[in-house]
C-alpha cells in the first residue's frame, strides 16, 4: 500500500468547456477520481448517493446516442435526476436562443447542463450566461473534453502512464473536436502526438499545438503505442472535397496488414460510431488490439468524475457566498 | 497555545488489542467460517488486514479482506470545507450471507459507520455486520455501537484522538492531543 502523500485536491471550475483550459493537476484529479468510480460500474447495485438531489439536463442540438446515454448513465449512477431535452421537439424549434433555453433551465433549478451544439464556442457562451455548471459534450470543431478524457483514461489504464507515449491520431483532424481535446490533454501530460490524414483534412498551423504531421499512415503507425482512429464525417463534407470512401480506406484505413508492419503491439481506439470498411476494417475493430468498447465503459467513469467535481465546486462556492 | 500530547496505546498495546479482538471475533462467531473483514479507508483497512492476519494465526483461516471508501456516502459532502479525495473501494468477494466484520480506527459520532453500513449494503445482503474499532471515544450522534473495542477512551470534544499505524505513518501509537493556553 503506498503512503498517502498526495496533496489535497483543488477543483475550482464551474464548467468543463475544454481540456485547453485545465491544468495538468485538474486532468490528473479527474482521471484519478474516474479510476475510483470505475469499480461502481461492475457492482450488482450500480449506484452511490453522491449527487442525490441534483438535477442534470442533457441539452443536445446534434444527434448523439453514445455521449448522451453515457452522461445519463453517469449521472444516474451518482443518484442525480436526469432530464433529456431533444431540440427537435422543444421550443428551440420555435426560435428560442441557446442562452434563453439555458436561462430557463437554470430557472427550473437544474444544477448542471450538458450541452452539445454544432457551433464552436456554444458551450462557452452558455457558461457565461448561466450561473449553473455547463459541460461541453462537443461544440462544433472545437472540443469534446470528456471524449478526450476517456481516451486518455483508457490509455493510462493500458500503459500505466501517459508521459512518453507515442499516440497517433488518424482521420479528419480538421473537423474533429475529439482530435483537439485529445491533443490538448495528451500533450499536457507529456505524450508525443502525431496526426495523420490527407492534406485536405489537416488544418493549417496544427503543428503549433505541439504535434507532428504526416500523410503516411504506415509512418504514423510504425512507432506508435496507440492509434486513435477518427470517424470520417462525410455528413460535414459540404463541398464534396473529401476523398471517396474506398480511396480513403485504401490509403488510410486501419487494417490487420498495416498493424503487422508496426514495431509495437499497438492499441487501437475509436470514439465511435465506427464506419467499418472506411476508416477501420471489421477485423481490427473487433480484434485483440481494439479497446473501442472499453472506451465506452470508461466514458461513464470519466463523466461521473466530471459531474462529481463540478457539483463539489458549486456546493463549496455556494457555501462560501453564504458565509461571507 | 501549546499542544498537550498524551500517549494512550503503545505499539505493544495496539498489538495486544488486535489479538484480543481477533479472539473475540472467532469466539462470538464460533470459528471463522463465513467471516469476511472490511476496513474503512485508510487506517481501518490496515487494521482489517492485521485482524485477518491475527485470525489466520488463531485458526489457520485465510479470510477475505476488503477496503471501503465512504466519501460518496457522506452526509456532509455539501458542507465540509475541504475537498474530499476519492479512494478505491475494493471488495473482491461476495458479501451475501457473510458475517462481515467492519473495522475502523476511531468510533466517534457514528456518522462514518452509518455511511459504511449504507455502502456495504449496496454490495449485497450480509447475514450480519459487526463493528470492530481500535478506540471508542464516545460522543455518538447516531444510535450505533461497536461489537469489539480495543480501548474505551472517555474524551472531551476539545480533544483530538490520533491513531498512527506503521502502514501509513511509520509508527504504531495512539495519543490524545489537546490545545492548551500557555
Image (cartoon, rainbow, N blue to C red):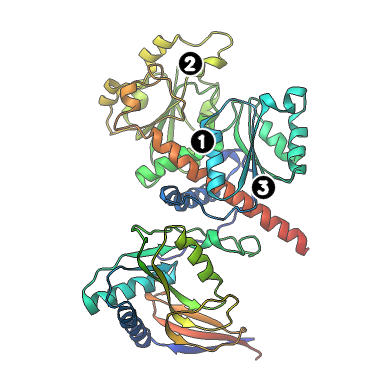
The mark nearer the N terminus, 2 or 1, is: 1
Q: Of discs 2 and 1, which sits in the foreground?
A: 1
Element at label 2: helix
Question: Can you give x and y, in whole percent of width and height, for residue B143 in the image?
Answer: 56, 76
Figure quadrant of residue A84: top right
Q: Are marks 2 and 1 on the same chain?
A: yes
Q: Nearer the viewer, residue A290 or A197?
A: A290
Q: Nearer the viewer, residue A177 or A62?
A: A62
Which residue is identified by label 3? A14
- Looking at the image, residue A243 lies above or below residue A158: above
Element at label 1: helix
Which residue is identified by label 2? A199
- Looking at the image, residue A28 lies above or below residue B52: above
- Looking at the image, residue A290 lies above or below residue B47: above
Answer yes or no: is residue A23 visible.
no
Which residue is identified by label 1? A147
Q: Of discs 3 and 2, which sits in the foreground?
A: 3
Figure quadrant of residue A22: top right
Element at label 3: loop
Alpha carbon distance from label 3 to label 1: 19 Å
Q: Nearer the viewer, residue A87 or A21?
A: A87
Chain under callout 3: A
Task: Determine crowd level at label 1: few under 14, some 14-19, many 20+ residues with C-alpha closer than 10 A.
Answer: many
The mark nearer the N terminus, 3 or 2, is: 3
Alpha carbon distance from label 2 to label 1: 25 Å
Amino acid at each position: 500500500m503506498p503512503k498517502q502523500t498526495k496533496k489535497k485536491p483543488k477543483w475550482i471550475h464551474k464548467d468543463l468547456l475544454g481540456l485547453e483550459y485545465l491544468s495538468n493537476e485538474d486532468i490528473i484529479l479527474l482521471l484519478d477520481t474516474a479510476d475510483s468510480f470505475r469499480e461502481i460500474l461492475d457492482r450488482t447495485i450500480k449506484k452511490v448517493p453522491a449527487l442525490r438531489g441534483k438535477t442534470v439536463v442533457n441539452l443536445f442540438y446534434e444527434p448523439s446516442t453514445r455521449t448522451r446515454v453515457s452522461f445519463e448513465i453517469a449521472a444516474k449512477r451518482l443518484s442525480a435526476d436526469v432530464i433529456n431535452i431533444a431540440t427537435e421537439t422543444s421550443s428551440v424549434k420555435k426560435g428560442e436562443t441557446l442562452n434563453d433555453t439555458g436561462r430557463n433551465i437554470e430557472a427550473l433549478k437544474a444544477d448542471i447542463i450538458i450541452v452539445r451544439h454544432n457551433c464552436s464556442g456554444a458551450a462557452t457562451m452558455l457558461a457565461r450566461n448561466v450561473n449553473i455548471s455547463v459541460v461541453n459534450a462537443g461544440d462544433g470543431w472545437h472540443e469534446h473534453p470528456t471524449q478526450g478524457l476517456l481516451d486518455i483514461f483508457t490509455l493510462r489504464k493500458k500503459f500505466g502512464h501517459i508521459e512518453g507515449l507515442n499516440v497517433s491520431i488518424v482521420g479528419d483532424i480538421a473537423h474533429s473536436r475529439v482530435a483537439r481535446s485529445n491533443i490538448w490533454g495528451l500533450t499536457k501530460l507529456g505524450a508525443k502526438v502525431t496526426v495523420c490524414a490527407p492534406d485536405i483534412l489537416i488544418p493549417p498551423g496544427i503543428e503549433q499545438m505541439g504535434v507532428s504531421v504526416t500523410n503516411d499512415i504506415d509512418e504514423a503507425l510504425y512507432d506508435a503505442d496507440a492509434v486513435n482512429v477518427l470517424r470520417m464525417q462525410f455528413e460535414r463534407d459540404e463541398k464534396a472535397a473529401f476523398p471517396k470512401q474506398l480511396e480513403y480506406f485504401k490509403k488510410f484505413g486501419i487494417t490487420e496488414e498495416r498493424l503487422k508492419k508496426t514495431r509495437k503491439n499497438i492499441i487501437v481506439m475509436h470514439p465511435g460510431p465506427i464506419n467499418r470498411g472506411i476508416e477501420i476494417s471489421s477485423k481490427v475493430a473487433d480484434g485483440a488490439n481494439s479497446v473501442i468498447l472499453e472506451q465506452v465503459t470508461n466514458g461513464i467513469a470519466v463523466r461521473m468524475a466530471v459531474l462529481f467535481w463540478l457539483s463539489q465546486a458549486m456546493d463549496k462556492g455556494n457555501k462560501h457566498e453564504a458565509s461571507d | 497555545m501549546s499542544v498537550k500530547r498524551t500517549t494512550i496505546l503503545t505499539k505493544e498495546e495496539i498489538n495486544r488489542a488486535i489479538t484480543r479482538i481477533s479472539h473475540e471475533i472467532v469466539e462470538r462467531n464460533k470459528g471463522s467460517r463465513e467471516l469476511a473483514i472490511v476496513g474503512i479507508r485508510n487506517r481501518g483497512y490496515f487494521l482489517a488486514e492485521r485482524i485477518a492476519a491475527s485470525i489466520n494465526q488463531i485458526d489457520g483461516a485465510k479470510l477475505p479482506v476488503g477496503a471501503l471508501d465512504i466519501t460518496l456516502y457522506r452526509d456532509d459532502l455539501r458542507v465540509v470545507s475541504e475537498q474530499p479525495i476519492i479512494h478505491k473501494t475494493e471488495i473482491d468477494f461476495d458479501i451475501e450471507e457473510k458475517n462481515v466484520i467492519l473495522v475502523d480506527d476511531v468510533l466517534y459520532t457514528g456518522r462514518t459507520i452509518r455511511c459504511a453500513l449504507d455502502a456495504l449494503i449496496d454490495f449485497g445482503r450480509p447475514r450480519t455486520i459487526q463493528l470492530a474499532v481500535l478506540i471508542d471515544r464516545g460522543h455518538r450522534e447516531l444510535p450505533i455501537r461497536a461489537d469489539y473495542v480495543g480501548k474505551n477512551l472517555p474524551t472531551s470534544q476539545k480533544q483530538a484522538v490520533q491513531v498512527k499505524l506503521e502502514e501509513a505513518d511509520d509508527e504504531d501509537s495512539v495519543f490524545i492531543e489537546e490545545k492548551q493556553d500557555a
